[in-house]
Amino acid sequence: MKKKLLTLTLVVFLLAGLVTGCKDKEPKKKIGSGEISTEIEVSGSNEYGWEIPTETINFTYYHKRQINPDKEDAYTEMLHNYLLEEFNVNLTKVVYDTDKEERFNLMLTSGDYPEVMTGLSKK
C-alpha cells in the first residue's frame, strides 16, 4: 500500500512539474486562422495595419525563366528592401542563367527547391 501511494505521489508531482515548467512566460500572438496558423511574436504594425514579426521571415523565390543574374539583382533590389523594411520579410530570389527546363528538372530531382516557384506551365 505504501509503495502504491509513493508511486502515485511521484506521478502527481512529475505531472505538475511538467505542466508548470512548459508554460510560456510571454504569450505569443496567434497569426492566421483556420488550418494554417502560427504563433509568432510581433513588434508592432506598419502603416497598412499589418503586424510585423519580431524575427525576420526568410524564404526563397524562383521564377522559371532564363535571365542574367546580375540584371535580375538590380531589378529586384528595391522590392527586397521594401519587403524587409515594411514587413520584416527577407525575400531571396533564385536566378539561373542556364536552360530553364534543365534547371527546373534538376531542382525537382535533387529535392533542393525554394519555398515559392512561379512561371510554371502545364506542359
Image (cartoon, grey):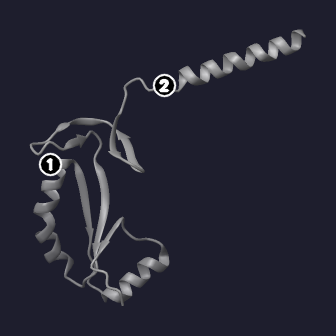
Give the side of residue 117 with respect to residue 105, left or right. Answer: left
Q: Residue at x 26, y 36 (%)?
A: 42
From the image, tell me which residue sits under label 1: 85
Q: Residues within 10 Å of mark 1 (few under 14, many from 20)?
A: few
Secondary structure of the residue carrying numbered label 2: loop
From the image, tell me which residue sits under label 2: 23
Secondary structure of the residue carrying numbered label 1: helix
Q: Residue 107, percent across and down?
A: 42, 77
Give the side of residue 4 with respect to residue 73, left or right. Answer: right
Q: Residues within 10 Å of mark 2 (few under 14, many from 20)?
A: few
The front one of 107 and 121 is 121
Q: Residue at x 43, y 82 (%)?
A: 106
Give the quadrant of residue 18: top right
Instruction: In the displayed orientation, state which residue is furthest to the right.
Output: 1
Give the side of residue 57 with respect to residue 12, left or right. Answer: left
Task: Tell me the distance, in whole angstroms, between the alpha carbons under discs 1 and 2.
Answer: 32 Å
Give the side of residue 123 with respect to residue 87, left or right. Answer: right
On screen, residue 87 above or below 118? above
On screen, residue 17 above or below 58? above
Compare marks 1 and 2 and give the one earlier in the sequence. Answer: 2
Q: Residue 101, percent across and down?
A: 35, 88
Residue 7 is tagged as none
Give the quadrant of residue 61: bottom left
Instruction: In the displayed orientation, state which residue is furthest to the top.
Output: 2
Q: Residue at x 24, y 60 (%)?
A: 91
Q: Residue at x 52, y 27 (%)?
A: 22
Under mark 2, the amino acid is: Lys
Under mark 1, the amino acid is: Glu
Q: Quadrant of the N terminus?
A: top right
The front one of 32 and 109 is 32
Contact? badges 1 and 2 (CB < 8 Å) = no
